[in-house]
Amino acid sequence: MLQSPRVLALASAEPRFHFTQEALLREAQARLLGPAWQHKAAKAQQAAQIERLFAATQVHERRAAVDLLSYYKRVPGTGERMAVYATEAYTLGKAAADECLRRAAGRREPGDVTDVSVVSCTGYGAPGLDILLARDLALPRRVPRVAWPLAISGTMASCLPW
């Protein structure tokens, strides 16, 4: 008997660092405009433009896997950023997947999972996050996996018409 697809459990995991948009705005202005920019009249227009851009996002709070206020004091290379991504994305993905399986416990087992979908807008890795999670959660090898690499899109990914 063919059963209709259904979602038995949903879960998410959030990065550990929390920032207000205001704190990130002030940090961006300081880094882009230089030290003591508030005391330089020539920088006022640029500061206002940056502030309008931040306000236009209508984002009030952000979460990140790294402390953004210190992580970019020295600009890390691509390899370093992808290494952080590999560790942090796996940690968050595994936490969310474990919670999903916990919520479905008693109704389904990991071997009953029929599909895995992973969305990331931050980085790349090989093997992909979907492959690592399916392996470590002991999902059947037959499980189709879909990975949506929305790289370099950041929070804009939520605006895509899907």
Image: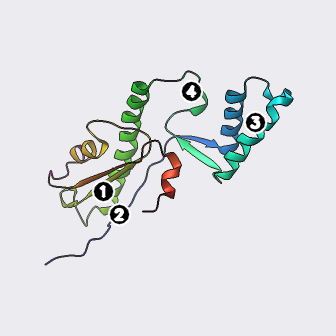
Residue 62 in picture, x, y percent from top left: 58, 45
Q: Mark 3 or mark 1, which has the lower sequence index? A: 3
User: Which amino acid is tagged 2?
Assistant: Ala
The CA distance from mark 3 to mark 4 is 21 Å
Q: Quadrant of the C terminus?
A: bottom left
Q: Which residue carries the number 3 mark?
A: 46
User: Which amino acid is tagged 3?
Assistant: Gln
The magenta region covers 136-141
Q: Quadrant of the N terminus?
A: bottom left
Q: Which residue carries the number 2 mark?
A: 9
Q: Is residue 118 above or below residue 104?
A: above
> Does the stretch in magenta take in 54?
no
Q: Which residue carries the number 4 mark?
A: 72
- Whether residue 88 sits left or right of residue 47 in the image: it is left
Asked which secondary structure carries label 3, the reply is helix
Q: Is residue 80 above or below residue 29?
A: above
Q: Mark 3 or mark 4, which has the lower sequence index? A: 3
Q: How many residues crowd around disc 3 within 10 Å: few (fewer than 14), some, or many (20 or more)?
A: some
Residue 105 occupies quadrant: bottom left
